[in-house]
Amino acid sequence: MKKLLVVFMLLGAVVQAIAAGDPKPYNERMQWFKDAKLGIFIHWGLYSVGDVSESWSMYHKRISWEDYMKGQAKEFTASEYDPKAWAKLFKEVGADYVVMTSKHHDGFALWDTKYSSVNAKQFAAVGQDVYTPYVEAVRAEGMKVGVYYSLCDWSHPDYTPITFDRPEKELRKLYPQQRHEKYLTQWQRFTKFNFAQLKELFDRYQPDLMWFDGDWEHKADEWPSRVVKDSLLSWNPDVIVNSRLNWYGDYNTPEQDPPVIAPDRPWELCITMNESWGYRKDDHNYKSSKYLIETFVRSVAKGGNMLLDIGPKADGSIPEEQLKILEDVGEWYGKHESAIKNTVQGIPYGHFDGETTVSGDGKTINLFLMGGLKDFTTLRGVKGKVKSIKLVGSGKSLRYQVVDSAPWNDIPGIIQIFFDNAEEDSFVTVVSVELEEPFELYRGIGHSVEMND
């Protein structure tokens, strides 16, 4: 009877969450995200000691649970952690939102959760909640707060599947449970725990964005993903969710490789600065600032955002190589913000040999030149009278001419733009083509000119 009562209570919560539905229209919830363009991703946890990779080193048995969890916890001091300085830096770079790991697959929580002793306050040398100061600092700088949360927890005694040996009896003590939970199945206990931690995060932080991970380990009806999504919306009707909640996410989340073809809904590219998400002492294979800025441009030109990852050290300091990249991205973005912010996906390929964005009013087309400046470039098949053509950043006017036009046959011609003595940007040079009226595109296949003016 007790077991049935508990199951009915769980079912009641499920029905209540589903009944809550989606209280705000999708487009209304997603608007700030589509406008944002740049976010900062932070992977920080026990793995930030820097000797092994986050969680996966334990999964692949390259390190024992004891050495990974207990050994690294002794060195997770956060002695140099300054969340206000972090947030100020991210704001200066141009980020509109920040996502930080609240708990990775290893189960270590950065906030002082009451549902597990495996948290920063009780389990690690830092001895205190380090997540709340992050949220407060990000909000104080006017940026949206994103919470990364792993659906799987490889330290929880009731979680399956597990690929490595764990001290099962000790884990029972680290994840305290109530008496009535003995009437639940193993998976029901874990699901109850997951919902409890998620509710705790929402009660404390009311995140603007929930960034899930680990959904591949179970099917949607096992997590259960629909109930998770509906519950989040009942707790915060404005929250948006990434795609890693099976098919219940609000936007696509490609990783590392920018799509060649734009997805058909909002999306962000999450990308590392080197080959690691968290800090690794031995990973010095950093991507160049130019490559990352070009990737940012390619993402925005296809209507997406870029979520640029950093991996602070266990003491809370950000590695110098990462600071330099952030500085370069911020400097370039600051000079070329008008070509990124308040823009939409660029014009189709073929009209320009490169990436483009378009202003919200349709009167300006921004051209991104990544291979350096040559004698000239061309913009093809664009109808409308040119008002001005300038280098973004310096404001220098550029000489241009319209050639091979036949307006009486509806052929707009080719805008040829010259770079006489123009100074190129060390990363990506941007040209703005401003028109008198919102532009139209000529998308014809071409035809013979039977009459000339």
Image (tube, helix red, strand yellow):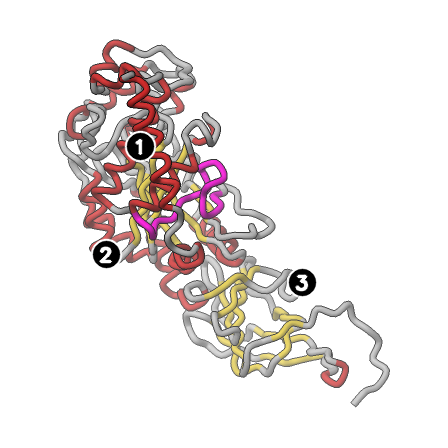
Image location of residue 297, percent across then percent down = 49, 56
Circle 2: residue type: Glu
Query: Which numbered marker is on residue 141?
Result: 2
Q: Residue at x 47, y 70 (%)?
A: 360
Which of pointers 1 and 2 indicates the residue nearer the eye?
1
Which residue is tagged 3? Answer: 350
Viewer-nearest of labels 3 and 1?
A: 1
Mark 3 surroundings: few (<14), some (14-19) or many (≥20) residues within 10 A: few
Q: Amino acid at mark 1?
A: Phe
Q: What segment is highlighted magenta in the picture?
A: 236-253
* Cα–Cα gap, marks 2 and 3: 41 Å
Give the CA distance from mark 3 to mark 1.
49 Å
Q: Upstream in the sequence, badge 3 or badge 1? A: 1
- Mark 1–mark 2 distance (CA, rounded to whole Å): 30 Å
In the rendered image, is residue 346 in sight?
yes
Q: Residue at x 29, y 57 (%)?
A: 92
Mark carried by residue 195 = 1
Q: Earlier in the sequence, mark 2 or mark 3?
A: 2
| Mark 1: secondary structure | helix
In the picture, residue 320 is in which quadrant?
top left
Looking at the picture, tell me which residue is in the foreground, 268 or 281: 268
Q: Position of residue 276 (x, y in %)?
A: 40, 34
Does residue 201 belong to the magenta stretch? no
Above-or-below relation of 250 to 9 = below
Quadrant of the frame with the N terminus: top left
- The residue lying at 38 percent from left, 35 percent from top is 277
